Amino acid sequence: MSASAMNNTDLLANLQQGWTQALASMQALSSGKGGDHPGMAMPALSFDPEKLQAIQQQYVSEAARLWQQGFAPASLPDRRFADEAWSKNPMAAFSAAVYLLNARTLMELAESADGDGKVRARLRFAVEQWMAASAPSNYLAFNAEAQRKAIDTQGESIARGMQNLLADIRQGHLSMTDESAFEVGRNVAVSEGAVVFENELFQLLEYKPLGAKVYERPFLLIPPCINKFYILDLQPENSLIRYAVEQGHRVFVVSWRNPDESLREATWDDYIENAAIEAIHTVQDISGSEQINALGFCVGGTILSTALAVLAARGEDPVASVTLLTTLLDFSDTGVLDVFIDEQMVQYREMQMGSGGLLAGGDLASTFSFLRPNDLVWNYVVGNYLKGETPPAFDLLYWNCDATNLPGPFYAWYLRNTYLENKLAQPGALTVCGEQIDLGRIEAPAYVYGSREDHIVPIGGAYGSTQLLGGPIRFVMGASGHIAGVINPPAKKKRSHWIRADGKLPPSVDEWMARATEHSGSWWTDWSKWLASHAGRQIAAPKTYGRGRKYQAIEPAPGRYVKAKA
């Protein structure tokens, strides 16, 4: 037998052994064997023998072809290995090619598993995290690009990388941008305004009109409390807040307090009664308008809708219209976040902080980052530490790193009653602030927006709100994801949005999309026309912030609450 034939025989034997071990490990993982937490064991998985055989044959075939190419694989179709240093280093190129083959095969194995949808989703997520972490690009010993840079800089890049690592350890999180380039109130969140009300949960900001007249009905924005409001006011050219002011609205915004130990016992009811409802009534009082227009973004939309349902139960009708941006009210489709939610996990959080405590902002930020591990974690590990680079200044990533804490009781209630049990979508299933919740009693016209590629609020989840609210609804879908789809000013002339001309809202988003028409550019212009139709007549713009002695300017916007660090 020739040496080549012997090598190929050994290769195939090793592949067969590795395949068997990999399959055994995956089945052991799925059945909970070998784990430290038997109470959290996943149900056992089974695999279709024909699918397994097909995947195995394909793997062996591709591995043999890769071996025959020697240390010169034809291509590395992954941007982590795009630099020419990888292709010029045969060993590095081969290790990258083997890694990509293994990653594809493991994902095919995960996809072929027989089991319920949640178990398969968890298996896919685990494999994605494992493969993202094990990429050869993440380690200096295998990263040809980082090695070349170390040689070219005579070791300076490694020294800078160690400095970056120590700096990140001191600050407590991975740097995604040059955070020294930004300061809230100096070059982000710079729209002119003032704080006109505050309590222990939030500050209410009022923004200065840019024209001589405003619409008679004021406009209140409630952002998510899991991060800071200035995602809506990063820069003047992409600020939704400034855009609303330019359109002639008298704009008010809730700026959530970054919770500390004094709020460790704050509940969902507290955030509804003493924040959302308080903000609505305060804006009514300041403006003298019986009705206002209101917008909720992400969790802010869930909070706003709950507050409006409480007020409806009390016989109040405070809003002329409601806008929901990437908001979940029906939690039957929560996308990748569903892999984290089950009875054991929720019980653990309830025992840990249901009676009091804080969910650290860094923990929440890490969870969201690992939903896209290659882009939001390992990309910066490689750049910051292996290559000694300083990430460029980027306002969006600065905001992303500006974490917020959450009160434990608020968080535990939210997990159980929405993500786990989906009670908000069931009329009468929840009691909040002493009132039974029925979203169908919210009869104000609603503008519901969802982003097509959103991985936090899937488009189907956003669309689900159209089946719950009681008033006339306009649904619009935008391109891109959770943030980029929302923050899409018209002047940029980027992306598209979809509208269904007949206005019908069938049960599923797929049915809706089948008749929807694509329109180029931002959805903001469509929303602005819709909002103006509910804003009333135009009146003289106020010349001062607030109203009388009761609501005077406390401090300039963006206020001190938003500047507090987690």
Image: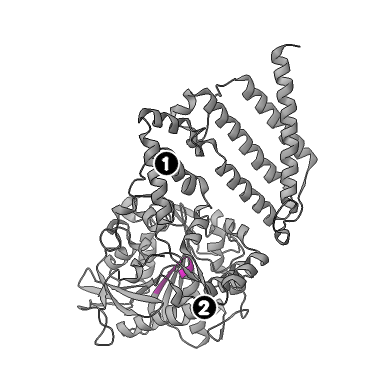
Q: Is residue 437 magenta?
A: no
Total marks shown come to 2
Name which of mark 1 and mark 2 comes first in the sequence.
2
Q: Residue furthest toward the top?
A: 2
Say which residue appears at 60% left-offset and 68% top-offset: 349
Does residue 452 sit above or below 161 in this rendering?
Answer: below
Q: Can residue 483 be seen at all in this image of the molecule? A: yes
Say which residue appears at 61% left-offset and 50% top-offset: 125
Say which residue appears at 46% left-offset and 86% top-offset: 316
Name the secondary structure under disc 2.
loop
Task: Name the residue carrying label 1.
Answer: 383
Task: Place residue 432 in its image quadrant.
Answer: bottom right
| Quadrant of the rendering where the N terminus is positioned | top right
Q: Is residue 297 magenta?
A: yes
Task: Place residue 106 in its image quadrant.
Answer: top right
- On the image, the x and y values in percent for residue 43 come to 75, 56
Circle 1: is it few (<14), some (14-19), or many (20+) Cα within 10 Å? some
Left or right, residue 242 beside residue 384: left
Circle 2: is it few (<14), some (14-19), or many (20+) Cα within 10 Å? many
Task: Name the residue carrying label 2.
Answer: 267
In front here: 539 or 251?
Answer: 251
Question: Which region shows up in magenta?
Answer: 294-300
Name the secondary structure under disc 1.
helix
| Quadrant of the rendering where the C terminus is positioned | bottom left
* Amino acid of disc 1: Gly
Does residue 86 sit above or below 109 in this rendering?
Answer: above
